[in-house]
Image: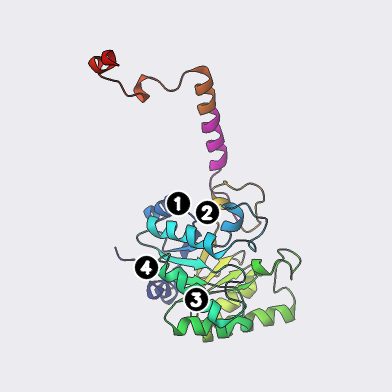
Amino acid sequence: MPRYSINTIQKFKDNKEKFATLTAYDYTSARLLDRVGIPLILVGDSASMVMYGYDTTIPVSMDEMLLVTSAVVRGSKEALIVADMPFMSYQSSIDKALENAGKFIKKSGAGAVKLEGGTEVCNIISSIVNIGIPVMGHIGLKPQSFHQTSGYKIQGKSINDAEKIMLDAIEVQKAGVFAIVLEGIPSQLAEKITESVSIPTIGIGAGPSCDGQIQVFHDILGLFDTFIPKHTKQFANIGNYIVQAIEEYKKDVISGEFPTADNCISMDKNILEKL
């Protein structure tokens, strides 16, 4: 099967079909998502926390994001891979934005990039799109603005904020994004935006009316238990199973129960005698 493209993602909206997307950060998880048929994988800058151990998305670098994006591309053969442009990889100039977006496409093999912001980044979006690179937008709660917003706070609850987010959605669509992530906004506002734009909306903490939904791989599997966001649902608690398995391994090694003969390679007796 050929990879999903921005056109096939658009068809979900056109046909009024809901679709599920997820983040991934390594080869193995990307292969698992392919087995399920997830159409779009975001290599999120949330790798900053769940893979590299930083406190926010802000410290992760281009090199670190290129590394994980390349691994995901190698693991997935079907999904559209969208690379998240990290903080300060696009904000300082259009030239820098074009260079870094190009690295994600040329070096890591991603099929699109994502960047945060509304009207303030429309010129950057259009410049990237104009050189042939698909862009996904991201408005509402913007994790890279952590310090500006004094933490991760729901956006769009006041009339002024809601109107600004509505305007952001319209303007980034005009700038050429093929889809918009709506994060951390009231569900009613997300519904209005979804009705107002012709491109797919992908919600995370934005209610059920978005065309698609995205969640962090580690959150839905219970692998990252430092903080469980309100917008997520743990569909499994694999973290506990992993801990139990490691405890069993440790116990069997200490007791001598592992490895057994089944786990060992035998040597030819004649060769052994010559030794």
Mark 1 to mark 2 CA distance (whole Å): 8 Å
Q: Earlier in the sequence, mark 3 or mark 2?
A: 3
Mark 1 = which residue?
29
Residue furthest front in the image: 275
Q: Residue 145 placed where, x, y %?
A: 68, 70
Q: How far apart are marks 4 and 3 (CA)?
A: 25 Å
- Residue 233 is one of the magenta-drawn residues: yes
Q: What residue type is labelled 2?
A: Phe
The answer to whether residue 131 is above or below residue 211 is below
Q: Who's the residue at 65% across and 52% down the image?
A: 228
Report which residue position mark 2 lands on. 217
Under tag 2, what secondary structure? Answer: helix
Residue 83: say if magenta: no
| Residue picked out by circle 3 | 99
Of callouts 4 and 1, the N-terminal one: 4
Disc 1 to disc 2: CB gap under 8 Å: yes
- Name the element at disc 1: helix
Q: Residue 5: x percent and y percent? A: 38, 71
Amino acid carrying mark 4 in the image: Tyr
Q: In this view, does 7 lie above or below 31?
A: below
Q: Name the outermost residue toward the left.
A: 270
Return the x and y of residue 231 as percentages of the image width and height. Answer: 62, 59
Q: Quadrant of residue 142?
A: bottom right
Residue at the (28%, 20%) spot, across then down: 267
Q: Distance between the residues labelled 4 and 2?
A: 19 Å
Q: Do the residues labelled 1 and 3 touch (CB within 8 Å)?
A: no
Q: What stretch is highlighted in magenta?
A: 232-247
CB under 8 Å between discs 3 and 2: no
- For the C terminus, the quadrant is top left
**Residue toward you, 195 or 8:** 8
